[in-house]
Image (cartoon, rainbow, N blue to C red):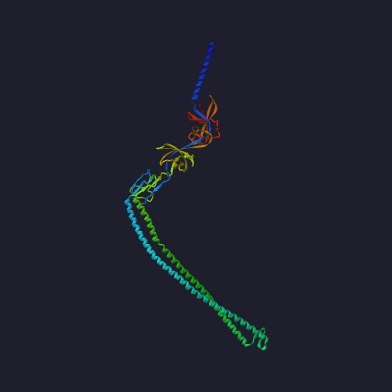
C-alpha cells in the first residue's frame, strides 16, 4: 500500500514537472516569436541643418577690346582662358588692308573739302542776296510809314474842317433862333403899348398888324430853315470824314504790318543764310574722318597690333582670323585686380536655411597652397522656377582664380524644441501623415505585456537625424519605439529589449 501511494506521488510530481517544463517551453516559444523593439523618450534640444553646395569662381566684371569696325584680322595672340600681361599683343590687323582703307578715307576727305568750299561760296552769294532783300524790305516799310503819315494827316484835316464848318453853322443857327425869339417878344410888347390901329384883336389871339414886322419874322424863319438843312448836311459830312479817317488809319496800319513782316522775313532769311549748314556739316565730317585716319595710321605704325593696357584673362573671343572686326567687342577679358564672384546652387530644401548675410565656410584647394578654408558671406539670392536657390558670394579679396572649384558649407541652428526624437522613430502613412509607435502595458495570459499604439504627431522641424514633433498625447516620459525587428501594427504585442 505504501509502495502504491509512493508511486502516485512520484507520478504526480513527474506530471507537474512535465507541465512546468511545457509551460516554460511554450512561453519561451511565444516570447521568441514576438517582435523585439528598442525604445526612447522625447528630449529637449535644438536641431542643426547642414547646408552644402559646390560652386565655381566667376568674373564679376568684364571689359571689351575694341578695334575700328570693318578691319581684317590677321592674327589672334591669345585664346579663351589664357592670361596676358600689360603690353601683350591681343589682336593683329592686316596692315595692307589698313593702308588701303586709309587711301579710301583720304579720298573721301578731299571730296568733303571740295564740298565745303562750294558750300561756303554758295553761302556767300546767298548772304549778299539776303542782305539786298533786307535793305529793300526796310526801304518799303519806311516808304509805307512816310506815305501813310501824309495820307492820314490829310484825312484828319478834312475831318477837322468839316467839324469847324458844322460848328460855325451851329452858331449861326443858334443866333438866328435867338433873333427870331427876340423879334417876336419886341413885336408883342410894342403892340400892347400902341393904339388900337397897330393890332387886330380876334378873341384870345393878338397878331402884329405892322407889315414890316411880319416880313422880318418870315426872313428869320427862312434863315433858320436854311441853316438847319445846312447843319444836317454838314453832320453827314462830319460822319463821312470821320469814317474816312478811320478807314485810312486802318488801311495804313495793315500796310505797315505787311511791310514790317516783309522786313522780319528778310531778316530771318539773312540770318539763316548766314548759317552755312552744308559747310559746317562738311567740316564736321572732315574732322571725324581725320580722327579715323589718324587712328588707322597709329595701327599701321604698331604693325596692326592691338595691345593690352592691363593684365588679365580672356573670357571670350568674338572673332576669328580672316574675319573683319564687328562694331562690338572683339574679345572680352577680366582684369587681374577685378571683381571675383562665387556662384552656387542650393536645393529647394536647403534654400530656407540661407539668406543674405549668412556666413558660409569655403573649402578649396590650390596647387601652390594646397587645401585652404575661408569664410564668405552671402550677398545676393536668386530664386529659380523649381524652388531652388542660386547664391552669390564676393570672393574678390580671397585670392581665388577664375574657375576655382569651391565647396560651401553652413550650419543653421533652429529654436529649442521640447519633443525631439530620432528620425528612425518617425513614420508616414499613405496620406503622408506622420506618426510614432508608443507602448502601453496590459495584463495578458503570460502576465504583463507591451502593446503598440500608433500616435499621430505634427512635425515642427527635422534634419537628417532628428525630428521635432508635437502632440497632445506625448509627454517627456512617453516610451516611443525606436527600432523593431519586424513591421508593427496597432495593438500588436512586442518584446522590449535594452
Residue 270 shows in this picture: yes
Residue 447 in which image quadrant: top right
Residue found 36% across the figure and 54% down from its top = 294
| Depth check, front residue: 130 or 196 | 130
Residue found 60% across the figure and 83% down from its top = 220
Q: Position of residue 452 (x, y in %)?
A: 52, 30
Image height of 251 relative to 8, above or below: below
| Depth check, front residue: 13 or 426 | 426
Residue found 54% across the figure and 11% down from its top = 2
Q: Position of residue 181 (x, y in %)?
A: 62, 82
Q: Position of residue 21 (x, y in %)?
A: 50, 19
Residue 179 in which image quadrant: bottom right
- Residue extending furthest toward the left: 96
Q: Position of residue 475 (x, y in %)?
A: 55, 32
| Depth check, front residue: 376 or 241 | 376
Residue found 62% across the figure and 87% down from its top = 212
Q: Is residue 304 left or right of residue 250?
A: left
| Depth check, front residue: 323 or 277 | 277
Q: Is residue 217 left or right of residue 115?
A: right
Image height of 121 relative to 479, above or below: below
Amino acid at each position: 500500500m505504501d509502495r502504491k501511494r509512493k508511486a502516485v506521488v512520484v507520478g504526480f510530481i513527474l506530471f507537474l514537472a512535465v507541465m512546468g517544463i511545457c509551460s516554460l517551453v511554450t512561453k519561451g516559444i511565444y516570447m521568441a516569436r514576438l517582435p523585439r523593439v528598442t525604445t526612447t523618450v522625447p528630449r529637449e534640444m535644438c536641431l542643426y541643418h547642414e547646408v552644402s553646395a559646390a560652386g565655381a569662381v566667376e568674373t564679376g566684371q568684364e571689359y571689351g577690346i575694341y578695334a575700328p569696325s570693318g578691319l581684317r584680322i590677321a592674327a589672334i595672340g591669345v585664346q579663351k582662358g589664357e592670361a596676358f600681361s600689360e603690353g601683350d599683343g591681343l589682336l593683329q590687323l592686316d596692315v595692307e588692308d589698313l593702308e588701303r582703307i586709309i587711301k579710301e578715307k583720304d579720298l573721301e576727305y578731299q571730296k568733303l573739302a571740295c564740298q565745303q568750299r562750294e558750300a561756303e561760296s554758295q553761302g556767300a552769294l546767298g548772304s549778299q542776296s539776303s542782305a539786298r532783300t533786307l535793305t529793300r524790305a526796310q526801304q518799303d516799310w519806311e516808304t509805307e510809314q512816310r506815305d501813310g503819315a501824309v495820307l492820314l494827316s490829310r484825312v484828319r484835316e478834312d475831318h477837322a474842317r468839316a467839324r469847324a464848318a458844322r460848328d460855325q453853322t451851329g452858331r449861326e443857327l443858334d443866333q438866328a433862333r435867338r433873333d427870331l425869339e427876340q423879334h417876336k417878344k419886341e413885336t408883342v410888347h410894342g403892340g400892347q403899348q400902341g393904339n388900337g390901329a397897330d393890332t387886330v384883336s380876334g378873341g384870345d389871339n393878338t397878331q402884329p398888324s405892322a407889315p414890316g414886322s411880319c416880313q422880318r419874322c418870315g426872313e428869320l424863319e427862312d434863315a433858320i430853315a436854311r441853316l438847319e438843312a445846312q447843319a444836317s448836311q454838314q453832320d453827314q459830312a462830319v460822319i463821312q470824314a470821320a469814317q474816312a479817317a478811320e478807314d485810312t488809319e486802318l488801311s495804313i496800319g495793315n500796310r505797315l504790318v505787311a511791310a514790317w513782316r516783309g522786313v522780319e522775313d528778310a531778316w530771318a532769311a539773312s540770318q539763316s543764310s548766314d548759317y552755312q549748314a552744308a559747310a559746317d556739316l562738311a567740316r564736321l565730317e572732315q574732322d571725324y574722318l581725320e580722327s579715323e585716319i589718324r587712328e588707322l595710321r597709329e595701327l599701321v605704325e604698331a604693325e596692326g597690333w592691338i595691345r593690352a593696357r592691363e593684365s588679365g584673362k580672356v573670357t571670350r573671343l568674338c572673332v576669328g582670323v580672316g574675319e573683319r572686326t564687328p562694331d562690338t567687342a572683339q574679345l572680352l577679358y577680366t582684369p587681374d585686380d577685378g571683381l571675383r564672384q562665387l556662384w552656387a546652387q542650393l536645393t529647394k530644401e536647403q534654400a530656407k536655411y540661407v539668406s543674405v548675410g549668412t556666413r558660409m565656410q569655403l573649402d578649396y584647394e590650390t596647387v601652390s597652397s594646397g587645401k585652404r578654408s575661408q569664410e564668405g558671406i552671402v550677398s545676393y539670392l536668386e530664386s529659380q522656377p523649381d524652388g531652388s536657390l542660386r547664391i552669390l558670394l564676393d570672393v574678390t579679396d580671397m585670392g581665388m582664380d577664375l574657375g576655382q572649384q569651391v565647396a560651401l558649407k553652413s550650419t543653421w541652428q533652429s529654436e529649442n524644441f521640447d519633443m525631439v526624437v530620432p528620425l528612425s522613430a518617425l513614420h508616414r502613412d499613405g496620406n503622408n501623415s506622420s506618426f510614432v509607435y508608443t507602448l502601453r502595458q496590459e495584463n495578458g495570459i503570460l502576465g504583463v505585456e507591451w502593446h503598440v499604439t500608433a500616435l499621430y504627431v505634427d512635425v515642427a522641424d527635422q534634419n537628417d537625424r532628428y525630428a521635432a514633433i508635437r502632440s497632445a498625447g506625448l509627454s517627456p516620459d512617453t516610451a516611443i519605439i525606436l527600432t523593431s525587428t519586424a513591421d508593427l501594427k496597432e495593438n500588436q504585442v512586442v518584446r522590449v529589449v535594452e
